[in-house]
Image (spheres, rainbow, N blue to C red):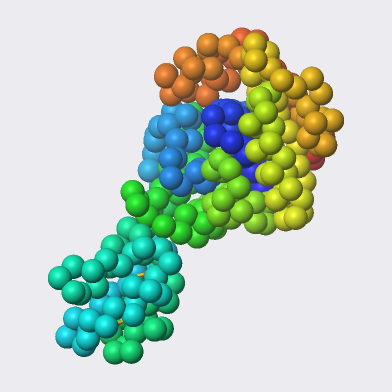
Amino acid sequence: MEIVVASGKGGTGKTFVAANLAYYMKTSVEPVVAVDADAEAPDLLLTLGGSGEELFEKPVSASRKASIDYNKCTQCLKCLDACRFYALRVIEGKPFVIEEYCEGCNACGIVCPANCISLYVKETGIVRADVSRSGVPVVTADLDVGGRNSGELVFLAKSEAYALSRELKAKHVVVDAAAGIGCPVISSLAGAHVLITVVEPTPPSISGAKRLLEVAEKMRVKPFAVLNKFDMPSSRIDDPARELGVEVLGKIPYHRSVVEAYVNMKPLLAYAPDGEVSKRLKEIFNYFVESVLR
Ligand code: SF4
Ligand code: SF4
């Protein structure tokens, strides 16, 4: 089963929940492969202790860029009007492509009367797999700085995770999605069975979670929620299940041990297994595994 952990807004503790869920499943006889699908800022592997063993690393060429043949260019500049991404600039009368802005849409190539614009494929990132020091296999989508097409990178990372899960006989894949509802999140949800929305009790987090849940409904992914930092002083939500319209698996209190676990690069369940937050996490994950995954 594919379980996506996501949030409509950054900073809610999504990676914290995903890392500890994967660790819990690995230590409770539920073999699992974790995927870091937050391709612009992947940190799941670090949260699970860093790399204990590198399995593979594959470059990904998932974006196209425009290239101009100046031997044919007549400097008519029609291509500039066609580009909606401000990826063409004029220098000394000639058009130049700014690679970082180019989306590879080929609109410039279509309008060019001299037929002198072509597209080439560019490496945009890597997909790598490791066994973390805490023992969880992790596949990471890692986008290059300024790279584009993170949705396709996530798709490729998930494909590698499924191949690895077959090899390792792991029944489940836990995906740590990017924040928001952009292209990489859609790619994370595509084909997934379950969504765990991590939400904190603030208006921006609630409204972000509602947008995410709408997307999940359209993609027919079964939604659940976890309320993180429910006891923060600025809490603005009394009944999260009613507010969000989904089953809430549980509430997690705030405690500084969560930050300490991050600093020590360990999942909290390994760093402070007997603490109050770990106790809550185990209750939530046990209920989730027994009532949803079985
Ligand atoms: S449209 Fe073609 S010929 Fe005209 S400036 Fe652009 S690249 Fe050159
Ligand atoms: S391929 Fe698209 S984004 Fe890139 S320069 Fe041409 S029109 Fe602009």
Could you say which is closer to the camera, residue 281 or residue 68?
A: 68
**Residue 21: quadrant of the picture:** top right
Q: Residue at horizontal 19%, vertical 81%?
A: 70
Could you say which is closer to the camera, residue 136 or residue 205?
A: 205
Q: Where is residue 118 in the image (x, y as percent from the top left)?
A: 32, 80
Q: Residue at horizontal 27%, vertical 66%?
A: 89
**Residue 43: quadrant of the picture:** top left
Q: Is the C terminus in the top left, top right, bottom left or bottom right quadrant? A: top right
Q: In which quarter of the image is ligand 1?
A: bottom left
Q: Residue at horizontal 47%, vertical 14%?
A: 260
* Residue 134 left/right relative to 82: right
Q: Is residue 17 above or below residue 257?
A: below
Q: Can residue 199 be seen in this view?
A: no
* Residue 255 left/right relative to 282: left
Q: Where is residue 86 in the image (x, y as percent from the top left)?
A: 36, 63
**Residue 263: quadrant of the picture:** top left
Could you say which is closer to the camera, residue 133 or residue 38?
A: 38
Q: Residue at horizontal 81%, vertical 23%?
A: 239
Q: Is residue 133 above or below residue 190?
A: above
How many marks the image carries: the answer is 0
Q: Where is residue 31 in the image (x, y as percent from the top left)?
A: 62, 39
Q: Position of residue 47 (x, y in %)?
A: 47, 29
Q: Is residue 145 visible?
A: yes
* Residue 40 left/right relative to 206: left
